[in-house]
Image (cartoon, helix red, strand yellow):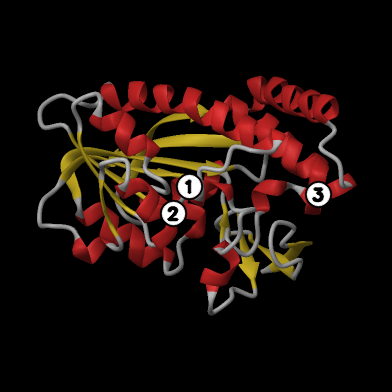
Amino acid sequence: MKLYLKTKDYAVSQEEFHLLHDADMDMLITEPSPDALGKYYQSEAYISHTDANKSLIEKLYQAVKKYNLAKKVKLIERYGQGERTLLDFGSGTGDFLVASKNCDWLAMGVEPNPRARKLAEAKGVHVCSEMDRLKNGKFKVITLWHVLEHLPNLEEQITQLISKLDNTGILVIAVPNFRSYDAKHYGQCWAAYDVPRHLWHFSRNAMEKLFSRHKMKIIEIRPMFFDAFYVAMLSEKYKTGRTNFIKACCIGLWSNIKALGSGEYSSLIYILQNA
């Protein structure tokens, strides 16, 4: 594997990390992978484990999250025939579980972070700390919203997730796309690298190859348009020390426009079924 670029943990530790390119898979791997990852999540800066709503970026994050929740529920509704069972793996503070439960899904989550799990449980949803604590049974839909990139022992955890999926069920996986225009524009400052919390960095080719090993096929790919704007705002802050709202919006818009032809959006949702 060759060095793709050097970057750092802009959000928490300021430590430097390398991204290595696996040419066969067309994916990047974060090196070194810390033994104690937990400390890199213990920060108010890690917004997906809090319900923070104070700064401009936090307010925008919460506004976009609210919009996306409705879109996410609408997406899984297409696959809700029969038993409406849902597992949200990496459920964070539980908002997607709440939205799904309100639409009559039998929804439960897995979230290892105790702080996020406590916030989720206060909203009245069932969340386990790990997969092994789930009761026996299969799920019609399993979702991972910007979670796959965080998972150590990637192949092992994919196998475990698929074992919990109904034979006719679907996996819904959202991940950043390092082949997007905004990733290329910001380089080492691209916020969606988010090292070392993101251990893996996927392309469309990587997702197809990775899941074909597990006899899963991609049946649909959908863009997450708002991610380009949010990631650009964070990237501007990392690059210049300022949010640069207007410039970030321009970069986010141009990234989406470029992706109309290439399909290389800042983040992509993959819907997978048994092959």
Q: Where residue 246 appears, x then y in whole percent?
A: 83, 24
Furthest-right residue in this view:
240
Residue occupying the point 51% across, 48% down = 50
State the residue position of label 3.
Answer: 238
Q: CA distance from mark 2 to mark 3?
A: 31 Å
**Neighbours of disc 3 within 10 Å: few (<14), some (14-19), many (20+):** some
Q: Secondary structure at mark 1?
A: helix
Secondary element at image label 3: helix
Report the side of 185 relative to 132 (left or right): right
**Amino acid identity at mark 3:** Tyr
Q: Nearer the viewer, residue 265 or 65?
A: 65
Residue 139: horizontal and vertical position, in percent?
Answer: 18, 43
Q: Name which residue lies at 75% across and 70% down.
A: 15
Badge 1 local density, few (<14 within 10 Å), some, or many (20+)?
some
> Which of the labelled discs sits on residue 210, or is there none?
2
Tell me if label 3 and label 1 are in contact, CB under 8 Å: no
Q: Which quadrant holds the C terminus?
A: top left
Residue 155, compared with residue 264, is above or below; it is: below
What secondary structure is found at the residue carrying circle 2?
A: helix
Place of residue 56 in the rendered image (x, y in percent of width and height, measured from the top left) = 71, 33
Looking at the image, residue 63 sits to the left or right of residue 70; the answer is right
Q: Which residue is mark 1?
A: 207
Cα distance in 3D space between marks 2 and 1: 5 Å
Badges 2 and 1: C-beta atoms under 8 Å apart? yes
